[in-house]
């Protein structure tokens, strides 16, 4: 079955960077895209961006364009999300999620989710 | 891209039906049938329950149904069960090739 397993919780200081990994199994990794979604404590879901695992195309949400980089390593079926210049309001659970559709040119539906990675930003 | 608008909370008794609305604009909900709904019980990751406005993934009970009219999509849960208590989020593809979520609705089963 499809599984996305994320890296463990992180604690960072303001101004630092964090890199979260998302290891996929149970499907052909390079046929689907991966989105990253975050959820601040007690808040809703916020889409951060998307990367195609088959051609490396990315599309970042406007709020994150200058601070986020999404990459994939097809040899290990792993997606990564790096967020720089962390602030206290970046404290959140970060999820990776797989596109429902193969070879999509953009994301529109997320059918399998990782377990989430808690990132805490505190001095 | 502003979040889609959902009511903060809805409630219903076991066996009743509830409907959650999701209002967007002509740049998202109104332009595409790429509206999805996700269920998120406390402390867990979201789970896809409706895609392409009306379709259910395998394993999702047919008590969950979706619809759309203009810029507003809706999720209806019939024959409410205690296990349905969760947060529900809508999402839509947008004209900017991005994804936007609703603010979320907390469903309480009385």
Image (cartoon, helix red, strand yellow):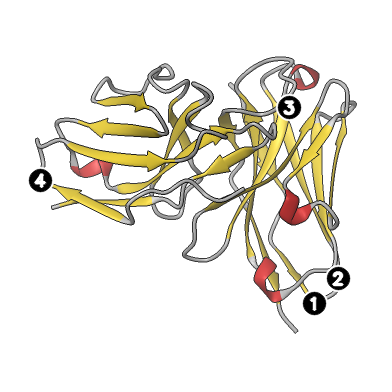
Q: Earlier in the sequence, mark 3 or mark 2?
A: 2
Label 2 with label 1: CB-CB less than 8 Å: yes
Q: Which residue, given by chain and number where applicable, does mark 3 sit on?
A: A33
Callouts 4 and 3 on one subunit: no
CB under 8 Å between discs 1 and 4? no
Q: Is residue A38 left or right of residue B46?
A: right
Q: Mark 4 = which residue?
A: B13
**Which residue lies under the disc numbered 2?**
A16
Within-10-Å neighbours for mark 2: few <14, some 14–19, many 20+: few
Image-based side of B82 in relation to B45, left or right: left
Q: Secondary structure at mark 2?
A: loop
How far apart in space, not on screen, are marks 2 and 1 (Cα)? 6 Å
On the image, the x and y values in percent for residue B83 come to 25, 42
Q: Cα distance, mark 4 to mark 3?
A: 39 Å
Q: CA distance from mark 4 to mark 2?
A: 48 Å
Kindly identify which chain the residue marked by label 4 belongs to.
B
Across and down, in percent, residue A8 comes to: 70, 55
Pinpoint the chain carrying mark 2.
A
Picture quadrant where residue A77 is located: top right
């Amino acid at each position: 079955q499809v599984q996305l397993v994320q890296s463990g919780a992180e604690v960072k200081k303001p101004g630092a960077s964090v890199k979260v990994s998302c290891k996929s199994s149970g499907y052909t990794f390079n046929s689907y895209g991966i989105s990253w979604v975050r959820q601040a404590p007690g808040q809703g879901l916020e889409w951060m961006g998307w990367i195609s695992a088959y051609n490396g195309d990315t599309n970042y949400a406007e709020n994150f364009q200058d601070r986020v980089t999404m990459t994939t390593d097809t040899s290990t079926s792993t997606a990564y999300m790096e967020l720089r210049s962390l602030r206290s309001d970046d404290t959140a659970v970060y999820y990776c999620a797989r596109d429902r559709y193969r070879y999509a040119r953009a994301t529109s539906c997320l059918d399998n989710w990782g377990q989430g990675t808690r990132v805490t930003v505190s001095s | 891209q502003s979040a889609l608008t959902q009511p903060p909370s809805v409630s219903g008794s076991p066996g009743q039906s509830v409907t959650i609305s999701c209002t967007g604009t002509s740049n998202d909900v109104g332009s595409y049938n790429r509206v999805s709904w996700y269920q998120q019980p406390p402390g867990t990751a979201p789970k896809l329950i409706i895609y392409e406005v009306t379709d259910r993934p395998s394993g999702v009970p047919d008590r969950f149904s979706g619809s759309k009219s203009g810029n507003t999509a809706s999720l209806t849960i019939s024959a409410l069960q205690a296990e349905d208590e969760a947060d529900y989020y809508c999402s839509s593809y947008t004209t900017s090739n991005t994804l936007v979520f609703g603010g979320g609705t907390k469903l309480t089963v009385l």
